[in-house]
């Protein structure tokens, strides 16, 4: 510093008619000494007096700070309060040429250009250190050449020219996020896959972002894709098979109805209440066809009516069987002398039983639809990655009340039929009612755990399977034996045989 000041003062060309002086203070790399030296310069004495200056002239033009920014920043904060500038006021728009072909100039604010040598400290095998210039930063030259580094001259700390890796983990690709390792530096991390429903679409993501509710991740978890929509469709194999089975099965009760109509004057048909049997066969046809409302896109109107339709047609079916069972019981009890039940053996009584049972189910369905109607919903919880369009029954109490009412009717029919199963007739319909109600109840009791364990469209498929299975159980148990006798055992279709009066001669 002293040599540079002497050279400037002795040169008539650098700063003519201006003499420079300087003060030097050693901070000894201590912050409080740095602070004390700064205040001494401001005071002008050998001791610091804050906010007081004993120096008259010449003024302190500029201050060169410590080479470490920790100390020079402290100086800058204090000197800024006193409006001191990093250079001399007189250096504005000054340009100086040196003998080594380098120039030094100051702009209108008194600031010099940024010219720095890039130095590499290199350790030799004997332990000595050498400072080697490996590049420079100079804002005077063109911007393309302002910063240059000769990397072949650089020696790194491990004694090699190769650039050391600054991280201890490989980069995390898209679909993963960085998770820090416990007890290790921040540059050490694990690549953790994004969880289901979340993605990361750039390298070294810190966290994953969730997909919108109607979208899901691809296999790589770097992109959100629209979720596929699921419902029991007519176009898929399962829906097509169930609909075809429903339509073809509904033809069976209609065929039996045609057979009964053709043989309506025979003892077999007349003994089983022809009119009530026709109603039962029509209701079984409706039971098979009712499964069709569960297939296809679940519109709001379809959701509103499908369970009510199912409940009503099955209530009609079970009510007819219950009426048959009660009429068999009345007929048996009326054979006793002086029985008062003879006046109850009439078709009007059976029709009244059917109407009363059906009206109660109608009341339950109307209350359900009017107070808590089913509605369409898009379920994204049951099957992650898929939007299940389904009907929400809205009220589980109403749904199980409708289904439970059918169970009550079937249980009453089963109990009454079981009590009169040993009537002396050769063809006792109570036996077949017992089997039909037992099969009906078994199907729907099995349906409850099966429906709770299934998801999405398979829940609907389970209910359709229960509808068709229970309908087939009623058709087989109630009408298959009668059709067999009518078609293949016509000699048994007689009044004497039904009453057990024809005895086989030995």
Image (cartoon, grey):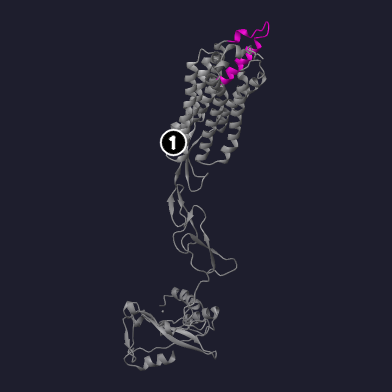
Residue 359's x, y, as percent?
53, 19
Residue 386 located within the stretch drawn in magenta: no
Task: Please give the range of residues in magenta.
Answer: 319-345
Q: Can residue 391 be seen in this view?
A: yes
Q: Is residue 304 visible?
A: no
Residue 415's x, y, as percent?
65, 22
Give the residue at mark 1. 296
Badge 1 marks a residue whose secondary structure is loop
Extreme residue toward the front, this view: 506
* Residue in the foreground of this view, choosing between 194 and 187: 194
Question: With respect to residue 104, does 311 lie above or below?
Answer: above
Extreme residue toward the bottom, this view: 10
Residue 102's x, y, as percent?
34, 87
Question: With respect to residue 119, does 430 lie above or below?
Answer: above
User: Quadrant location of the C terminus?
Assistant: top right
Residue visible at 32% across and 83% down?
Answer: 94
* Residue in the foreground of this view, choosing between 254 and 152: 254
Residue visible at 59% across and 66% down?
Answer: 182
* Residue in the foreground of this view, choosing between 318 and 176: 318
User: Quadrant location of the N terminus?
Assistant: bottom left
Residue 330 located within the stretch drawn in magenta: yes
Residue 101's x, y, as percent?
32, 89
């Amino acid at each position: 510093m002293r040599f540079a000041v002497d050279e400037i003062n002795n040169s008539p060309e650098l700063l003519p008619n201006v003499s420079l002086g300087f003060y030097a203070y050693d901070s000894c790399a201590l912050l409080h000494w740095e602070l004390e030296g700064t205040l001494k310069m401001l005071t002008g004495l050998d001791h610091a007096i804050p906010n007081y200056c004993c120096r008259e002239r010449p003024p302190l033009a500029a201050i060169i700070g410590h080479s470490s920014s920790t100390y020079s920043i402290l100086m800058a904060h204090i000197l800024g309060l006193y409006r001191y500038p990093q250079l001399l006021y007189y250096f504005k728009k000054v340009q100086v040429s040196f003998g080594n072909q380098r120039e030094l100039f100051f702009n209108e604010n008194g600031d010099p250009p940024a010219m720095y040598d890039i130095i590499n400290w290199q350790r030799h095998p004997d332990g000595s250190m050498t400072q080697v210039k490996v590049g420079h930063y100079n804002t005077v030259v063109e911007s393309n050449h302002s910063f240059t580094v000769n990397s072949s001259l650089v020696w790194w700390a491990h004694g090699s020219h190769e650039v050391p890796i600054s991280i201890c983990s490989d980069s995390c690709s898209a679909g993963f996020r960085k998770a820090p390792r416990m007890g290790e530096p921040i540059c050490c991390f694990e690549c953790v896959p994004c969880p289901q429903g979340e993605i990361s679409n750039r390298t070294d993501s810190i966290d994953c972002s969730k997909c919108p509710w109607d979208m899901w991740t691809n296999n790589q978890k770097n992109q959100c894709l629209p979720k596929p929509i699921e419902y029991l469709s007519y176009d898929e194999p399962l829906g097509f098979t169930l609909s075809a089975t429903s339509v073809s099965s509904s033809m069976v009760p209609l065929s039996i109805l045609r057979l009964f109509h053709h043989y309506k004057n025979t003892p077999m048909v007349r003994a089983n209440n022809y009119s009530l049997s026709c109603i039962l066969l029509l209701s079984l046809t409706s039971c098979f066809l009712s499964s069709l409302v569960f297939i296809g896109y679940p519109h709001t109107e379809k959701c509103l009516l499908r369970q009510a339709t199912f409940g009503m047609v099955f209530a009609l079916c079970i009510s007819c069987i219950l009426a048959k069972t009660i009429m068999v019981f009345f007929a048996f009890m009326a054979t006793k002398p002086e029985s008062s039940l003879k006046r109850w053996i009439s078709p009007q009584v059976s029709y009244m039983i059917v109407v009363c049972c059906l009206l109660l189910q109608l009341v339950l369905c109307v209350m359900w639809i009017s107070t808590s109607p089913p509605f369409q919903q898009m379920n994204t919880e049951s099957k992650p990655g898929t939007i299940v369009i389904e009907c929400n029954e809205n009220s589980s109490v109403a749904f199980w009340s409708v289904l439970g009412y059918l169970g009550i009717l079937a249980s009453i029919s089963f109990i009454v039929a079981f009590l009169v199963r040993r009537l002396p007739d050769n063809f006792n319909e109570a036996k077949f009612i017992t089997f039909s109600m037992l099969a009906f109840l078994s199907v729907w009791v099995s349906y409850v755990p099966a429906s709770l364990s299934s998801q999405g469209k398979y829940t609907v498929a389970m209910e359709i399977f229960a509808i068709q299975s229970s309908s087939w159980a009623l058709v087989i148990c109630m009408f298959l034996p009668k059709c067999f006798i009518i078609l293949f055992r016509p000699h048994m279709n007689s009044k004497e045989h039904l009453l057990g009066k024809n005895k086989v001669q030995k």
